[in-house]
Image (cartoon, grey):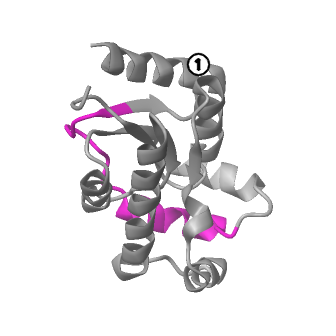
Amino acid sequence: MPDRMRALVVMGVTGCGKTSVATAVCERLDLPMIEGDAFHSAHNVRKMEAGMPLDDDDRKDWLDRLGMELADATAANPSAVLTCSALKHRYRDALRRAVPHLGFVFLELTREAAIERVSRRSGHFMPASLVDSQFRDLEPPVDEPGVLTVNALDPLPAIVDRVVAWWGADTAA
């Protein structure tokens, strides 16, 4: 049905578990996943590795590219899932313009939990020193359509069950 969610963006600050949740949802539903971090420019990765937060200009081309990737994925498949911080309302709106009827799963996490998680993570370009900048930029998707907010500290299977039930209820309605 054209007015149902065609795709999902798993969003939130660094360390909230976007990749883990999206991977599990995609495995459960046999859907393609787009890892948003894989599409950052070399310039953006170097900037983050140096402990410098991205600004709106840095994120513009990245968001445009993610919108194109998600549009392509939903043209080739019934649905797809994208991981993207999507911190600001205008970033989410840019993705909605690229793929109408887009749903968002907001993995809500405290600053302290994000710092702890990012500090334990290895092999990622985002240092714990940038957690505060993520929270400064975060505009929670309160009162936006097509958003499910979940506690990022809940067990992964419970989060996946909730996402699948919510998305399935939208699809079946």
Name the residue rendered at 60%, 36% in the picture: 21
Residue at x 62%, y 78% (from the top left corner)? 45
Residue 146 placement (x, y as % from top left): 28, 34
Q: Which of 140 and 1 is in front in this view?
A: 1
Number of on-image labels: 1
Q: Out of 120 and 71, give the one closest to the viewer.
A: 71
Q: Is 2 a magenta residue?
A: no
Residue at image position (49%, 21%) is 164
Q: Give the range drawn in magenta.
A: 125-148
Q: Name the residue carrying label 1.
A: 158
Work out which quarter of the rendered image holds the N terminus and state it.
Answer: top left
Q: In which quarter of the image is the C terminus?
A: top left
Where 145 sits versus 85, above or below?
above
Q: Which of 58 and 120 is in front in this view?
A: 58
Q: Is mark 1 on a helix, strand or loop?
A: helix
Decide: few, some or many residues near mark 1? Use Cα within 10 Å; few <14, some 14-19, many ≥20. Answer: few
The magenta stretch spans residue 126: yes
Tell me the amino acid under the disc marked 1.
Ala
For residue 108, say whether it is visible: no
In this view, which residue lies farthest toward the right?
Answer: 122
Question: Residue 57: where, in percent of width, then height?
Answer: 36, 82
Looking at the picture, how far across and down is residue 153, in whole percent?
A: 58, 32
Please indicate, yes or no, whether residue 35 appears anywhere in the rendered image. yes
Q: In this view, does 109 lie to the left or right of 155?
A: left
Q: For this view, does 144 lie left or right of residue 153? A: left
Relative horizontal placement of residue 162, taking residue 157 as reference (left or right): left
In screen coordinates, is 166 left or right of 88? right
Q: Quadrant of residue 64?
A: bottom left
